[in-house]
Image (spheres, grey):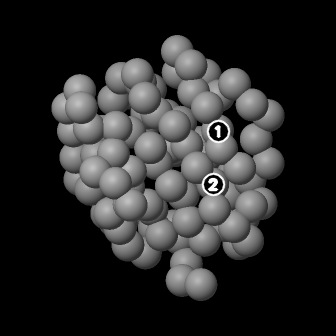
C-alpha cells in the first residue's frame, strides 16, 4: 500500500495492515512529515513489519536526517535501514 501525501494530508484512505506501508513525503515540511509518520506508526498493527518512507534527496536530506535522529529510539522501530535508493528509508518494525 502506498500513502500519497499532498499538502500534509494523506490522500488515500489508509489500511494499516499490509506487510509494508509506503509513504511518499515529497514536498512535505519536517513538521508535516513527523505528524504523518507518528500517525502511521500509531495505527499500524502487528502485520506491518516495515514502513518505507520515500523522501527524495535532490532537494536536501532534512526528512532523512530527521528519521535517523528522531525515530532511532521509537518504541515501535527496531532499526532504520537505508532504502534501495538515496531517497528512500525503511523503518523496520519487526524482522521477516
* Precedes in sequence: disc 1 or disc 2: 1
Q: Give the residue pinned by disc 1.
A: 3
**Vertical relation: 87 (above or below) 29:** below
Q: CA distance from mark 1 to mark 2?
A: 8 Å
User: What is the secondary structure assignment of the residue under circle 1?
Assistant: strand
Q: Nearer the viewer, residue 31 or 14?
A: 14
Residue at point 54% right, 58% down? 51
Q: Give the left or right position of residue 89, taking residue 57 as reference.
A: right
Q: Single out the residue that lies furthest toward the bottom.
A: 96
Residue at point 22% right, 46% down? 65
Q: Give the left or right position of residue 83, taking residue 11 as reference.
A: left
Q: Is residue 42 visible?
A: no
**Vertical relation: 69 (above or below) 58:** below
Q: Give the residue pinned by disc 2.
A: 21
Residue 84, position in %: x, y? 39, 61
Residue 21, position in %: x, y? 63, 54
Pick the quarter of the image with the C terminus: bottom right
Q: Quarter of the image holding residue 91?
A: bottom left
Residue at point 61% right, 22% down? 9
User: What is the secondary structure assignment of the residue under circle 2?
Assistant: strand
Residue at point 33% right, 45% down? 87
- Contact, CB < 8 Å: mark 1 with mark 2? yes
Q: Is residue 21 visible?
A: yes
**Vertical relation: 25 (above or below) 47:** above
Amino acid at each position: 500500500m502506498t500513502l500519497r501525501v499532498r499538502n500534509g494530508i494523506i490522500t488515500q484512505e489508509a489500511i494499516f495492515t499490509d506487510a509494508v506501508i509506503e509513504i511518499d513525503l515529497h514536498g512535505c515540511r519536517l513538521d508535516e512529515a513527523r505528524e504523518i509518520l507518528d500517525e502511521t506508526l500509531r495505527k499500524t498493527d502487528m502485520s506491518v513489519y516495515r514502513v518505507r518512507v520515500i523522501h527524495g534527496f535532490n532537494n536536501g536530506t532534512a526528512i532523512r536526517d530527521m528519521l535517523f535522529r528522531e525515530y532511532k529510539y521509537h518504541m515501535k522501530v527496531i532499526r532504520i535501514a537505508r532504502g534501495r535508493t538515496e531517497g528512500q528509508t525503511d523503518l523496520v518494525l519487526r524482522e521477516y
